[in-house]
Amino acid sequence: MKSLKTYLFLGLFGALLLSSCQKDPYTYAVIETDFGNMKMMLYNSTPLHKKNFIELANKGYYDDLLFHRVIPGFMAQGGDPDSKNAAAGSRLGNGSPGYTLPAEIGAPHIRGTVSAARQPDHINPQKESNGSQYFIVQGGVQTDQALASLERQKNIKYNDAQKELYKTKGGYPSLDGDYTVFGEIIEGLNIIDSICVVQRDGANRPKVDIKMKIKILD
């Protein structure tokens, strides 16, 4: 007859085995830059943006595109197909794959989140996302007063966890409710700080090209 210790051991072993066999429910990507690599987790709550990003990355669409718009304390934007081999000083930001994506607005713009760029409301009242352009939020630390003011202005409500992240990690909450956040950087977030302090021209384009490559991890 097996002892109680044996049953306890077998039960624990079985639980660990089951846990190790469970598949990670998330998809990850690596954004490669000259400053280093960033690992991104794609949100399951934005399936249209997730599927589109994976498809574009898998066919090499993003390879050698630029972070063409960088604003310290705000974000770094890239993914414009017109930025590939773009002449120095040329104005960028209007390119796309030729389609938009329906808005999947929900997650807040905490530091390190990845959000879809889009045209402004007066020509895009549905807040549809550009098919390829995205930006990584740098932002800054927020206060209770600033968050409360935004809640009133935008008629939104932050939960305690979101407030704590904004107050400790930072972000750019004035974009909340207006843009689709579809992922977040989970490794290499310091890279965005390096990108955001490069020298820029009058259109916030880095004076030295910052290229990207994106790979989806299996």
Image (cartoon, helix red, strand yellow):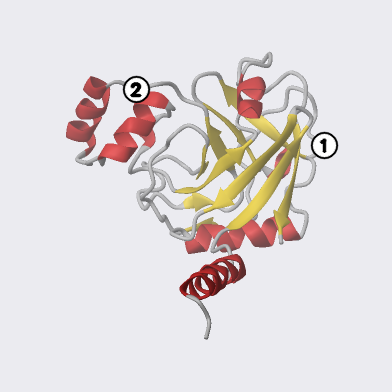
- Label 2, label 1: how many angstroms apart (C-alpha)? 38 Å
Q: Does residue 58 sit above or below 136 in this rendering?
A: below
Toward the viewer: 23 or 20?
20
Could you tell me if residue 44 is visible in this image? yes
* Left or right for 51, reference 208: left
Percent across and percent down for residue 6 are: 54, 73
Of residue 143 and residue 99, the one placed in the foreground of this image is 143
Q: Is residue 217 left or right of residue 96?
A: right
Determine which of the numbered discs, if any, sits on residue 97 in the image: none
Query: Within 10 angstroms of label 2, few (less than 14), some, or many (20 or more) residues?
Result: some
Q: Amino acid at mark 2?
A: Gln
Which is more foreground, mark 2 or mark 1?
Answer: 2
Task: Give the image quarter of residue 14.
Answer: bottom right
Left or right: where 86 falls relative to 44: right
Q: Residue at x 56, y 37 (%)?
A: 135
Vertical comparison of 190 with 62: above or below: above
Dot placed on the residue nearer the N-terminal end, 2 or 1 = 1
Q: Position of residue 166 (x, y in %)?
A: 37, 29
Q: Residue, x 36% and y 53% (percent of image)?
A: 126
Residue identified by numbered label 2: 142
Residue at figure coordinates x 33%, y 31% from the top left: 164
**Location of residue 20 (image quadrant):** bottom right
Q: Secondary structure at mark 1?
A: loop
Residue 98 appears in the figure: no
Q: Which residue is mark 1?
A: 85
Find residue 165 and report its horizontal and vertical position in percent: 38, 32
**Numbered disc 2: secondary structure:** loop
